[in-house]
Structures are given as C-alpha cells and as structure tokens.
C-alpha cells in the first residue's frame, strides 16, 4: 500500500511546461511534487526537436548538452520549390537550435529537482479530488498501486493528450480543423544542410508542412503535419510523408532509424486556463504556436508564470480561481497576442493554393527584406504579383 | 437499441506507435493511453470516427 501524500503544489506531467512550473514554484518557496506516468522523463521523444532560442534566458534555462546544433536560418519551400531563406538578419535571435529533446526534458527535471521539487515516476493521475468545485489533488496510481495526493494547487501539464484539464471542467477539446496529425522519421544518410531547418508548404502536407531538421553527420528529423480535417483516408500523414521522401532523392536514399508521431494543436488560445485550486499549462492548455507547431518555448514561459503564481497562492492561503487569474492574465499578456496573430495567419495559409504559395515565396525570394513583418511581406508580394495581394486584404 | 459499428484500435504494436493523437482529439475523452496500451470506453464512444482521421499511421478502424 502506497502512502497518501500532501503537498503545496502538485504538477502532473514532467515535460518542459511541468518541470518549469515545478521549478519556479519551488524557487518561490512552495513544497512541490511532480508526477510522471512514464518510467523515463523525456522518452520516448515526440517532437521535431527544432526550437527558437531567444526565450531561454527569460526562464533561466542554461545551454547544455541537450543542444544538438545551432542553425543559421530556415528555408521555406513552395510546392514548385521556390525557396525563401529566413536568416538572422530578418529573424534576429529567433533562429535557433536543433535539440536532443530527451536530454532537454531531463535537464529541466534536474533543474526542478535541484530547486527542491520531489519527483515520482511511474505515477499517473487517474482522477481529480474535489471539494465542491475546488480541485484539492488527485487520485493516482504509482507502479499500479492506488493512492491519493492532496495539494493546495494542482497543475495539469499532461501534454497534448491532456485529460486532467477536462476533468477539472476546462474545455480543452479541439476540433479536427484545430489539430495536425504528425509523423516523423529520424533518417540517416540524407543530404540535409546543417545550416538550415527546412519547411515545405502546400499540398505536400495539406494544412501543415513537411519539415527537415538536421541533426548533423547525415542525420535529420524528417516529418510532416497534416490538418486532421483535411485527412481523406487513414494514415494520410504517413502516405504524404513517404510520398515526399520518394520524390526527394537526397532523402529517398536515406534510411529510417526511428519513427515518432503525435498530435499538435493549431487552435486559437483557450478562453480559460484556471479553476479553483487548478491551472493547466503548456500543450495541455493548447499553448502551441498554431503557425509553427512549436510548443516548448510557450510551455516554458507559461510554466514560469504558473509556478510563480502557484507559490504565491500557497503563501497567501488563497487558491481561488480569482487569485489564480494572475496566471491567466500573466501568460496572456506575454503570449496571447502572438498566438492569436499566428492563428490568423495559419487560418489564411491553410486555404492557399499551391499556385499562390509559389508566387508568394517567389516574390519574397527576389527581394532583400530587412525585417520579416507582415507589412514587408505583403509589399514584396504586391510589387511582383499584385493579383495575389487581394487574398490578403484582411491583413492590411 | 441501435447497434453500434465496431471500433478497433490496433494497439499491439503492429501499427500503433502510442503517440496519443487519438487520445487528445477524442471529443468524449474516452480513449486512454497507458504506456504501450490504448483502450477506449465502449459505452461512451459514439463511433464519431474523428480518431480514425487523427491517427497518423492508420491503426484505428471502424467497420
């Protein structure tokens, strides 16, 4: 029989958002327990492993051996493979790292543990404990044995397939049009360029894109996301990805050594992320950037705010929804504008024809953009293909 | 009672890669991922087939 536990802050899920939440709550003086249903934090990896780097200092993540390589830029390919290069000149410090996600997640968990967080592996939440409407902890299973964890504040950081948000009454459901179904191969012996992360748009990946993130020495993550509402037959993600690889000799000659899949939300931000005694964070809170599909940075940034507010709530003795609004307001102030803007851009992009993608990328490739902004992009397109700009009038 | 179609999740590992895409999109929250086992609640599932589309490898069938 496992003993029941009591803590100030309980974090469910030890991914980046969970570890950051746990670390910051502990740094602010709370007693924190983080539970992880798997036996190994960070594994199996379900990620393309590309991320920007300008936000790392803000949340106090230090560079470490989780950095696989640093790229110089990104290349966007249209369906006929016109290419537009985004480099440090346009994107400033936005261009980033290809990472070893398993190492990254472990480092964040180590940082949390070093800040005083207790961690339990093979421990899954199976339902929420409630007093009235207030969440007061979870019923859990550790190594299959049931027990209870009581907490002043409970945080759901259980990733894309989050259950606890919905148990708490927060509608985190997503529609088919708000999700991409993703598949990725780790491939060896491929001709990827270690200086760039590559993105292929258009009908090669309806409602998403094909990505190539180089891992060095002929290794690369080659993956695809397809909007679920545009899937026409089972396993479309695999079919489209295999077709793309077949058509690219530099990849068709490669060998697959690993395969991962998963769902990525591409929705507008949630309306609500707190209830009495409970907050939801990261992919579980649909904080993934709906344009890029990136979730790590937003999860970590929101995690810092979430952990800080959790500790403040504990110290003040007030864990009500009203107090926890501080988290809700905080993450929205930091992330929501960009999330919403990128959601609007994505909503437009998923409707564009291959011909339009070809023209837009061609127009961008032909000019020296100093800074990548919607205004500059539209101006470049208008100068070369005035008829295409009509499609983007809503953005002007 | 009208008979429901049959939903089959191939989760023995022949097709399923345990990615959780079906779990995340299920509108009724009735699919569960437990390390290397995926189950669903027969009584709650309405056979809406959204999970069939969400599965990147075609491991879910309805007939």
Image (cartoon, coloured by chain):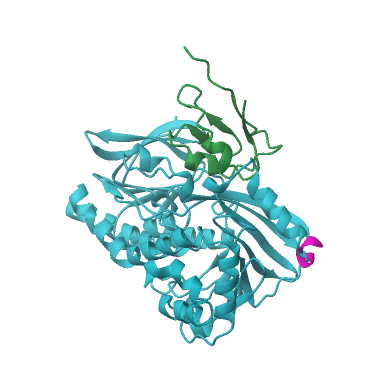
Chain colours: A cyan, B green
| Viewer-side residue, A64 vs A242 | A242
> Looking at this rendering, what residue extends furthest in the right direction?
A253
Q: Position of residue B30 (x, y in %)?
A: 47, 31
> What is the quadrant of residue A103 in the picture?
bottom right
In the figure, is residue A214 to the left or right of A317? right
Quadrant of the frame with the C terminus of chain A: bottom left
In the figure, is residue A14 to the left or right of A217? left
| Viewer-side residue, B1 vs A172 | B1
Q: Position of residue A94 (x, y in %)?
A: 48, 76
Q: Position of residue B6 (x, y in %)?
A: 59, 23
- The answer to if A58 sits in the magenta stretch is no
Secondary structure mainly formed by the magenta segment: helix
> Looking at this rendering, what residue extends furthest in the top direction?
B1
How many marks on residues? 0
In the figure, is residue A249 to the left or right of A24? right
Which residue is pictured at 50% across the width and 31% down the height? B48
Q: Can residue A40 be seen from the camera position used here?
A: no
Please say if A194 is above or below A354: below
Quadrant of the frame with the N terminus of chain A: top left
In the figure, is residue B54 to the left or right of B17? left
Magenta-tinted stretch:
A249-254
> What is the quadrant of residue A340 in the picture?
bottom left
Q: Can residue A109 be seen from the camera position used here?
A: yes
């Amino acid at each position: 029989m496992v003993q029941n536990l009591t803590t100030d802050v309980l974090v469910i899920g030890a991914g980046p958002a969970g570890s950051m939440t746990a670390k910051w709550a502990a740094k602010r003086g709370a007693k924190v327990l983080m539970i992880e249903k798997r036996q190994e934090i960070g594994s199996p990896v379900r990620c393309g492993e590309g991320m920007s780097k300008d936000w790392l200092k803000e949340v106090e993540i230090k560079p470490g051996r989780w950095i696989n390589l640093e790229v110089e830029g990104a290349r966007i390919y249209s369906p006929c493979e016109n290419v537009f290069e985004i480099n440090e000149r346009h994107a400033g410090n936005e261009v980033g790292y290809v990472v070893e996600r398993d190492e990254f997640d472990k480092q964040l968990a180590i940082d949390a543990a070093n800040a005083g967080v207790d961690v339990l592996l093979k421990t899954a939440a199976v339902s929420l404990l409630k007093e009235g409407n207030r969440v007061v902890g979870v019923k859990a299973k550790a190594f299959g044995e049931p027990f209870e964890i009581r907490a002043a504040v409970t945080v759901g950081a259980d990733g894309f397939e989050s259950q606890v948000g919905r148990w708490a009454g927060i509608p985190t459901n997503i529609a088919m049009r708000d999700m991409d179904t993703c598949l990725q191969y780790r491939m060896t012996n491929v001709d990827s360029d270690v200086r760039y992360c590559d993105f292929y748009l258009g009908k090669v990946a309806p409602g998403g894109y094909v990505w190539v993130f180089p891992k060095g020495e002929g290794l690369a993550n080659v993956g695809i996301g397809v909007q679920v509402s545009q899937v026409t037959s089972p396993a479309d993600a695999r079919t489209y990805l295999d077709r793309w690889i077949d058509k690219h000799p530099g990849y068709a000659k490669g060998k697959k050594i690993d395969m991962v899949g998963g769902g990525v939300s591409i929705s507008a931000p949630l309306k609500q992320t707190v209830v009495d005694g409970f907050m939801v964070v990261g992919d579980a809170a649909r904080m993934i950037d709906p344009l890029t599909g990136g979730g790590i940075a937003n999860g970590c940034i929101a995690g810092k705010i979430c952990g800080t507010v959790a500790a403040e709530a504990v110290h003040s003795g007030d864990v009500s929804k009203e107090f926890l609004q501080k988290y809700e307001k905080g993450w929205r102030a930091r992330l929501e504008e960009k999330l919403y803007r990128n959601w609007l851009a994505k909503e437009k992009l998923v409707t564009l024809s291959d011909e339009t993608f070809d023209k837009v990328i061609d127009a961008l490739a032909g000019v020296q953009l100093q800074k990548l902004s919607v205004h500059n992009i539209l101006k470049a397109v208008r100068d070369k293909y005035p008829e295409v700009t009509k499609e983007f009038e809503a953005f002007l | 009672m009208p008979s429901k179609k049959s939903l089959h999740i191939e989760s023995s590992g022949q097709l399923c890669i345990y990615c959780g895409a079906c779990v995340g999109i299920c509108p009724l929250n009735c699919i569960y991922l437990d390390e290397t086992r995926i189950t669903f609640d027969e009584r709650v599932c309405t056979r809406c087939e959204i999970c069939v589309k969400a599965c990147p490898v075609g491991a879910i069938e309805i007939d």
